[in-house]
Image (tube, coloured by chain):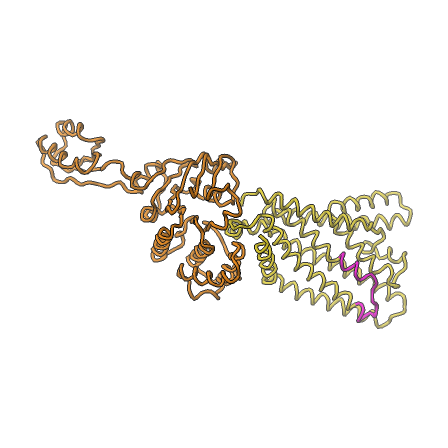
Amino acid sequence: MIVETVGLTKEYLDGGGCRDIDLTVGPGEIFGLLGPNGAGKSTFVKLLVGLLFPSGGRARILGRPLGDLTVRRKIGFLPESFRYQPWLTAAGVLRFHAALAGLAPREADDRVPAVLDRVGLAGVEKKKVGGFSKGMQQRLGLAAALLSRPRVVFLDEPTSALDPRGRRDVRRLIQDLREEKVTVFLNSHLLSEVERVCDRVAVIQDGRLAAAGRLDALLDRGLEVEIEVDEVNDTLLSALRPVVCELRREGTRLVVRVDGRERLPVLARTVCAAGRALYALEPRHCTLEELFLELTSGGEADA
Amino acid sequence: MLSGFFAVARLSLAEVLYKRIMAAAAVLTLGYLFLFGLGMHYLGRNWGSGLNELAAAQLFSLALYVAVLLVSLLAVLLGVGAIAGEIESGTAHAVLSRPLSRTAFLLGKYTGYAAFMALYALCFFLGLWLLMAWQAGVALTGFGPALGLFMLQPLVLLSLAFWASTVFSTIGAGVVVFILYGLNMIGGLVEQIGALLGQAGHESAPALVNLGIVSSLILPVDALYRLASFSLLANSGLLDAWSLGAMGPFGTASVPSVWMVVYALLYAAALLWLAARIFRTRDV
C-alpha cells in the first residue's frame, strides 16, 4: 500500500481535527478526499506529510511510518495555503526545493525547466514570484510537488485559485500521473473535479470517515426514476410498491428507486396496468454531489 | 540532509540581505558612524587637556552602548519571526514536508541569520574602532576580545528569539524577548549605579549590584557589553580606574566575571537546543 492509516486521529482543543480514520490507497490510484469546509480534510493530509503530529492511531506511507525522511524524498506535496519567498524567481524557488529534496545541482538543472513546462509556466523562470498571480503561484506549487519525481503526490485543493483552463490542465496532469503510475491523493471540495479523475473517494464529515470506496460503487445506489402520470392515486401507489425500493410523491410526479435499468419496462407496465396514462419515465443517475450532500447531511457543496 | 541545511542557511542569509529594513539599517548605521566620527574629530582637536580624553572615552562608551542596542534590536527583529513567521505565512508548509529534519531547518535558519548578524556587528564595531583611531588618534587596546564580545551579544539574543519563535507567535515572541532585553538593560544600569554607590560606601549598593547580576543570569547581554567596554577602555590610557567608574551607568564600575562569557555561550547553546526540541514536535 502507498498510504495506510489505522485509527489516525488528530484532536484540537476546539474539538476540530479528524478521528479514527482507516484508509488505504494503492499504487497508481487517484484517490479523492472529500468533505465540507472544516471537516478535517487538510488536517488529515497534513498528518500524512508530517506537518502535524497525530494524537492517536498510526499510519504508513510507502511502508514507512509517518515522518520518515527517506520516504519524504518520494513524496510531493502541494499545500492548501502556502507562500513562496516573493523575492525569489520561479527557478530560484524550485532550485531551493530541489536542494531540500536532495537533488544534485545537475539534476535540478534538468528538472526545473521540465516541471515548469509541465505546469504551463515555461518562460517565467527568471520572473520573481512576488509578481505572480494566485493561479501562477498554485502552478508553481504543483511544479515544486513534482520536482523530485515523487511516487505519491498529495494535492490539497490544487485548483482552488485556477480558472477553468487551469483546472482542465490540472485534470490532464493528474491523468498523466496516473499513466506514470504515480499515486495521487487529491483533497478537494470541487466535486466535479473529483468525479472526473478519481478512482476511489472517501468522504469526511465532522472529522470522521462517512464513506469510502470506488466511485462507481458509491454512486451505484440504485436507479432513481421520475414518473409523470395523469393522476397519482392509491391504486397506482399500491401497484408500484411491490416493484420499487423507495417511493415518494412530488406533486403529480412520483420518484421511485429501482435496482437497475432492467426494471424500467416493469415500471411502465405497472403504471399502465393501474389504469394511468404514462407521460414520462425518466431515469436519474446519482451524482457525486447528491451522494456528498446525503453523506454530509446539509453540508455545503461547492461544485 | 546537509544539502538541505546549507540550502536553508544560504536562503536565510539572502532573505535578510533582500529585506528593505536591512538597507535602512545600513544607511542609518553609516549616518550614526558619521556623527560619531564628527564628535571624535572635534574632541581630537584639543587633545592633551585631560577633559577631552574623558569626553572621548565617554562618547566612545556611549556610542558602543547604542551600537549594542541597535545590533540587539536587529537580532531580535530577525529572530522572532524565524519560525513563527514562516509558519504564519505558509512558507514552512512546503519546506517542512521535504526530507529535511526540523532541527536542520532551525539550525540552517539560525546559521544564515547569525552569519548576517556577525557580519553586521563586525562592520559596526570596526567602524567605531577605526573612527576612534583615525579622528581621536587612540588605538584602543583589547580589540580582539572586545570584538568577540560585541559579536556574541546578537547571537545570544538570536538564540533567545529563536526559542521564543518556536513557542509563541511572531508578535508574542517579540513582546517576550523585548521585555527580557529591557529587563536586562535596566538590570545592567542598576548594577553599575550600585557599584558607584558602593565606592561611596552606600549600604544598599550590594543589593543593587546583585539585582544586576540576577538580570544578567536571566539574559547575559548587558554583561557582555560591560566586558567589551572594560576590555577596550581599561588599558587605553584614556582613563584611570576611578574615571572609568565615573563615566556613570554606561561605564563599567562593576566588572562582570569572565565566566559570564562561558555562561553566555552555554546560554545560547541551551536555548537553541530547547528551540530545536520544541520545534521537533510542534504542529505547523
Where does the N terminus of chain A fall, quadrant-wise?
top left
Residue B220: x and y in percent read: 75, 49
The residue under the point 14% across, 40% down is A280
Q: Which residues are magenta?
A: B132-149
Q: Colour of chain B?
A: yellow
- From the viewer's perspective, tell me whether residue B109 is left or right of residue A32: right
Q: Main secondary structure of the magenta part?
A: helix
Residue B242: x and y in percent read: 90, 56
Residue A165: x and y in percent read: 34, 58
Magenta stretch contains residue A191: no
Q: Is residue A10 above or below residue B50?
A: above
Magenta stretch contains residue B133: yes
Q: Colour of chain A?
A: orange
What is the count of numbered marks?
A: 0
Of the pair A268 and B234, the residue shown nearer to us: A268
Q: Kindly give the residue lying farthest to the bottom in the view shown.
A: B45
The residue under the point 55% across, 51% down is B86
